[in-house]
Amino acid sequence: MNIKIMLSRLELLKIDLMANGMRVTKRARQALTQGGKVPLSLFEYATTTGIPLKFKGSDIYVNSPFGEDFCRNANWKLHSNDGTFFLLSEKGEQQEVEPIPLPSYFNKRNPKGEKWSWFAMTHTDRVRISPIAGCFFSCQFCDLSRTYRYQKKSIDDLIDSIRVALSDPILPAKHILISGGTPKPSDENYMDSVYERVTQEFNVPVDVMMIPRRDPSYIDWLYSIGVNELSINLELFNQDFANRIMREKSQIGIAKYLQFLERAVKIYGKNNVRSILIVGLEPIEDTLKGIEALAERGVSPVLSPFRPSPKTPLAHLLPPTKEQMIEVYERGAEIVDKYGIKFGPRCIPCHHNTLTFPDGSSFYKYS
Ligand code: SF4
């Protein structure tokens, strides 16, 4: 079946915000920061540097950039009255929004005096833990290896941080993602212990973001311990761009990625394995080839628009334009539809930093 995508007004608004950002008025800033007590964003990872907003009357979430240089001339402005009402406006157009707050633990410390946010951070309804600080790799779009020295974190502290996040009084997490930096091969056993402990301790879905391991049957073990879904990210499909921008990941080889993804789909089922493709760092035609390569294997592509991070060699680049995002989304949607695949992720609040929209089907859900 050939579908024709017609993006709605709110879907186009989300894309506009991801491409151009927004400006935040003084009153909205005052309201969101509670008079300067809370930051607007923790700026702790490139794709989560914005303010997460939910469009009122819809299930559309967006993480709207506001602090980067490219937002200076943004058309949309975020307004507020007394902090109970937030509105985006541009030349007579308006949209009421609900800002999603930071969790209350964002600046609190554990009994050892370490910030909980060193271990965990919640965005919308998902808590992400980062067992490895820094990263064994050094992709040019990512600031992890440039911000933190490589080190493993205590598993007990990670577990405690998840407990704090799940019971947060302001933003209680509903599900868990184990992500963070890529471990050295010698630390893979440590990561396995993290996966095992987290899946044993908590009764909420636990997803894992990882690079392929040498042995594809490793997937069977992840499934056996109760890992809910996997995200194994191609990021870029054009291998020349991949070699230049993410050398270590590209050395794993696209064939190895695809083989690992195929095994994952065999175990987890179609549409239950995700893979991020970054939009805006390679020609659109290559991203579309990547979408096809994933969809034909039963993998759910996650379109993640590039957002420049100041500490990285790609800080000078701009995000993809609104028109580029629309083109990738529309043409990509026709491809995934051909294979009975949906864009990921499934979780609706987790759409905030991806080009994904709920379509009314049961595939997309609140965790
Ligand atoms: S492997 Fe992942 S965490 Fe590490 S530098 Fe690349 S994108 Fe960042």
Image: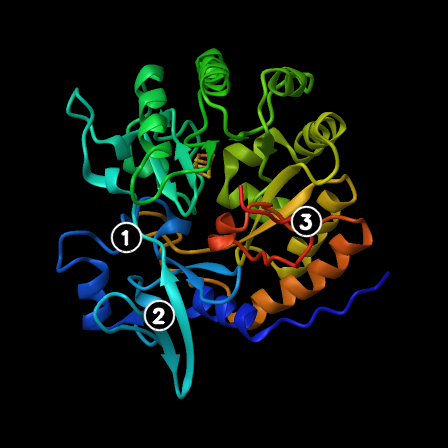
The residue at the far bottom in this view is 92
CA distance for labels 2 and 1? 14 Å
Return the disc, 2 or 3, that comes first in the chain's sequence.
2
Q: Where is residue 112 in the image (x, y as percent from the top left)?
A: 17, 20
Secondary element at tag 2: strand
Residue highlighted by disc 2: 22
Residue highlighted by disc 3: 362
Q: Hey, what amino acid is under mark 2? A: Met
Examine the image and state in which quarter residue 155 appears.
Answer: top left
Task: Please name the residue shown 36% across and 54% down the image.
Answer: 100
Disc 2 residue crowd, few under 14, some 14–19, many 20+, Cα 10 Å: many
Look at the image and name its color scheme.
rainbow
Relative to 50, residue 245 above or below: above
Q: Where is residue 225 in the image (x, y as percent from the top left)?
A: 58, 16
Q: Hey, what amino acid is under mark 3? A: Ser
Residue 41 numbered tag: 1
Residue 115 seen in the figure: yes
Task: Please name the residue shown 64% across and 62% down the image.
Answer: 329
CA distance for labels 1 and 3? 32 Å
Closer to the camera in the image, 87 or 113: 87
